[in-house]
Amino acid sequence: MTDDEVASLLRSDLPLVTIEAPAGCGKTHQGSSFAMDAASALSKGRVLILTHTHAARSVFAARTRAVANRVEIRTIDSFLTEIASIYHRTLDLPPDVAGWARENDRYDVVAARCRQLLESSAIVAGAASQRYPIIICDEHQDATADQHHAVVAVHSAGSILRLFGDPMQVIFADSEAEIRATLGRWAALKDAGGWGELSTPHRWISGTPELGEWILDARRALSNGGSIDLTGSLPPGLRVLFAENSAQVAHKAIGMSREHRAPISSLLRQSEQLLVMTVGNERVAHLNAFFGRSVRIWEGHTRNHLSALAACIRNHTGDLDAIADGFLSFVYATSVRFSASSHGNRLKAEVQQRCARPARGMPGQLQAIASHLIAEPSHRGVAKALEHLIGLVERKENGFSDIEFDLKSEVRDAVRMGAFDVAADGFAEITRRRTFSHAQPPRKCLSTIHKSKGLECANALIMMCDRSAFSGTEYKRRLLYVGLSRAKEKLTLIVSQNNATPLFNVPG
Amino acid sequence: MVEQPRIKYLAISKFRGIDSLEWRPDRRINILIGGGDSGKSTVLHAVSLLFSPTNTIQVLETDYLNRSTKEGFSIEAVVEIPIEVGISDHQQALWPWEWDGQKAILPDPSHEGRPNQAVFKFRVRGTDELEPVWEVVQPNEDVVAFSVGLRRKIGVVRLANDDRNDRDLRLVSGSALDRLLSKGNLKSRINKQVSDANISDALLKDEKDSLATLGVAMREAGLPYDLDLGLTSSQGLSIGALIGLLASKDGVMLPLASWGAGTRRMSALEVAGATEAATRLTIIDEIERGLEPYRLRQLIAKLTKDESQCFVTTHSAVAISAATEAALWFMDSKAKIGPLPHDKIANQQRRDPETFLAKIPVIAEGVTEVGFLRFLLRNAFTARPEDHGVRVCDGGGNETMMGLLQGLSEGGLVLGAFCDNEGKSPERWRRISERFGARLFQWRSGCLEENIIAHVRDDQLLALAQEPDGTFGRRMRTLADRLAIKDKDEASILAACGNPERRLAKLRSIIVAAATGNKDGAPDEQTGKEWSKHSQVWFKSLAGGVELGTKMISLSVWPCVEPEILPFINALRATIGDHPLAVGELRP
């Protein structure tokens, strides 16, 4: 379908229009230009754009600034959370629904209750549809069933609905069954209203157009259950390097022979910018070691470990044991070579004995850390203990010189939280600042494919492309597609032949 | 026709003389009646303050109950808001509550598809700093500002009872005229027109010279010079307040504001009504003000036809009788608003609208009882009954009256009642009697005529047949008819009454039967019809009731019935603060 055809379909009278939008095909442009036109024509209410990420929210905000008073852009979580807060008493939720959902990661509960409310109360759904006569959903494939039905309930109450999404980018589902359910919902939308598909790879026009076409072909193959052929001639911009993981326990590390490693190292060295993608946080850690910690880890916009720490502090301030456990779990998760056996158990023992016996050297330092927690079993004690530990690591004190903090942003934010009077306020404020600052990844960075979703860059590298990373499941097909579609100019794949993924058709 | 906003529930707390009030007004016209100082105008004022089209309202210390500003006051309303108001355009999202018929509730996600109505909760509070704060209460009890813009969109049209109220006829922000006319920047266009007017042309030569001299002096003092006169706007004085509606009177354009109160008020409503697609709540204090009965009826007919919700106070019987479609409410001295249910009071509203405006209405069963009671109560109070606000009203018969008494007393009116005992509906009468106490008078048995005639001495029975003009003929004729004799002289009638021992008892019963129009024993239907009209020949008229009272005195019956009636009279006296009378004290 041409861009013009999609544009006129969006502007038709149909109450519901769904646009299938492969990565890089101008979905944001179509969405925001439709939002501008629709907002200008509205006499009452406003256009609501629902995104899944704050990054997408700010992109839409920038593009619709001219009609900002008639367009409201929200993440779907924040939209549903607002409704849930307003009606929290009847939904059996605490008054501060936003804080509760954020700290306990219960946006799913919020969505479920909100859906039930919107489906059962014509009044609430009606009020929402009067306020938002037009609703545009971005990345709708990422909507859970509850989120989807909540939006549909408002649509049924009268709002015009325009959905953008890509079933090939469903990568946040918990199971194959859930993916199939999402695909089922998506397929059902085809019959429910207008249907269109974007097919011009705009992202690559200024970079390597042939790469863009090749990625659309690859998407088709992955979508149809087939595999991507790497045996023939490859388009400009695509490079395939064959290499094998030589680590003794292949799922615990990545190692390589010198000749396999050489081109990768040189690529890294020569690139001014490079996004290295892999599957899963563990592989990120392995690659981090593989590159000798020379490439920064992109932590994305989530702070899972910080959230857990904040929840622990909220529930257990004053309870020394629990606070110490929360502190240790946080440090284990964000650093390397600080484990229970190396440091944690001793620190815990010091906490339990209230640093009764004098100690020197490393145990003495652990005692100093413990004493911060003992003095203030709260976010402040945790922050001081962390700061102390960071100091020891930076000064390479005996017993601490090997430790490295991989998730620097999480650690930095946890220290910041100590400066607030109330932990929850600090967590909320830090989250808010991160939400609005839209940090960009470093020029060279190491990321999971998950965290790279929504990013685009000139050069990208995916490793390892092997059976362990990319089996043939619906999920892995989509994960591979998301990875493939990030780079505009040069994409490099590190492909295994010994442990070949069924998603690539590789020579002999 | 646009849908209109409607107040479903109003709660006032510690505002002016009202400590606490809850009210669920009708969706159309609401007429508030009640004694002086009961707080009717306060209720109207509260509604108009809540939807005030301006923020520059001054809250006074006297707006607080007992002038105690410390506790603040609050006026809260649950309101049905139509789409036309554009609440969805409000800067901040305002979320609805559900109306369950009694109150605003939260939607219950476990009950699907209840056809409840969306409502919003608005509030204005007077703070201890004498500031009014307008708020929308969200379903989670959070409050957001109830903006002046939204209040204007809801659009209160208020005709207050102060003499110079012509706000809605001026171009003041949010006035009816402003809502009708202002599209975009009308006021700035007017400003420009006025500024362009050449005012200095009005100056005489002397005055121009003075200005020029001043100019020279200013120039020498190093101040701005080259002086002229023109429009200078100033804080607190808007051009809109100076611009008002003019109308031609004998060829001269006069401000409508200088017409009479009635015309002004009617015009303001016309202006509000002419604004298409604009919603409104109408508030009219003392609707009769400045209006002749015919214009008052016109106005009420107009409000009845109009779909918008109105709040009206009145002291006018004309207004009450005309407002057949309105919901009537009685506000008692404790600021409680009670409904006067239409099905129970509609007849009375038509028959005797003043019933609702008396301080102490006394409902008498029928016309005879009205005459009798007016006679009996002549001397029952320190001043004339009407001077105390005591009004004897015709209740329209036993059955009708029972409903009326229930309706009025449920509404909170304090009233008396005087009625027969027909032995019907004992349970309902018992409940009424519990509510009324001694203010309900009901004969132990039978009716007024029966009870008075019963005590007339045998030898004076036929004195009852003498009409006030001295003639006997018509009443004697009714007795003769009942005895089926031709002659109507005393001897013939007595003779027809049977043997001498039973004769007088028979005569008495025949008189009672004739006076009450009893048709028992009539030989045929036609005769029965005639017999039932006999009562009119006797006492069944206003004058007849008075006559019966007079005869009660002249025939020395009063001492016999006094013990039964006196508690009732004393109960009425108590309502106006008079001490009880002892037996023998009252001389009707």
Image (cartoon, coloured by chain):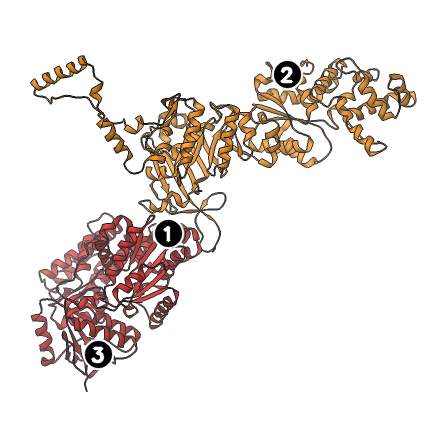
Chain colours: A red, B orange
Instruction: Give the labeled residue for mark 1.
Output: A128
- The verdict on a common chain for dots 3 and 2 is no
Pointers 3 and 1 within a single chain: yes
Residue B82 visible in the snapshot:
yes
State the CA–CA distance, disc 3 to disc 2. Answer: 111 Å
Q: Nearer the viewer, residue A328 or A306?
A: A306
Q: For mark 2, what is the residue?
A: B380
Query: Above or below — where is B458 with respect to B168?
Result: above
Query: Quick one: label 2, few (<14), some, or many (20+) residues within 10 Å?
Result: many
At label 3, which amino acid type do we have?
Asp
Comes first in the chain, label 3 or label 1 = 1
Task: Name the residue rendered at 58%, 33% in the picture.
Answer: B410
- The answer, for residue B332, to whether it is visible in the render is no
- For the residues labelled 1 and 2, say whether their Cβ atoms are less than 8 Å apart: no
Q: Position of residue B519 (x, y in %)?
A: 80, 30
Query: Which residue carries the number 3 mark?
Result: A466
* A257 is higher (above) or lower (below) than B308: below
The amino acid type found where label 2 is placed reads Ala
Question: Which chain contains the residue that carries disc 2?
Answer: B
Tell me if A157 is positioned left or right of B394 in this view. left
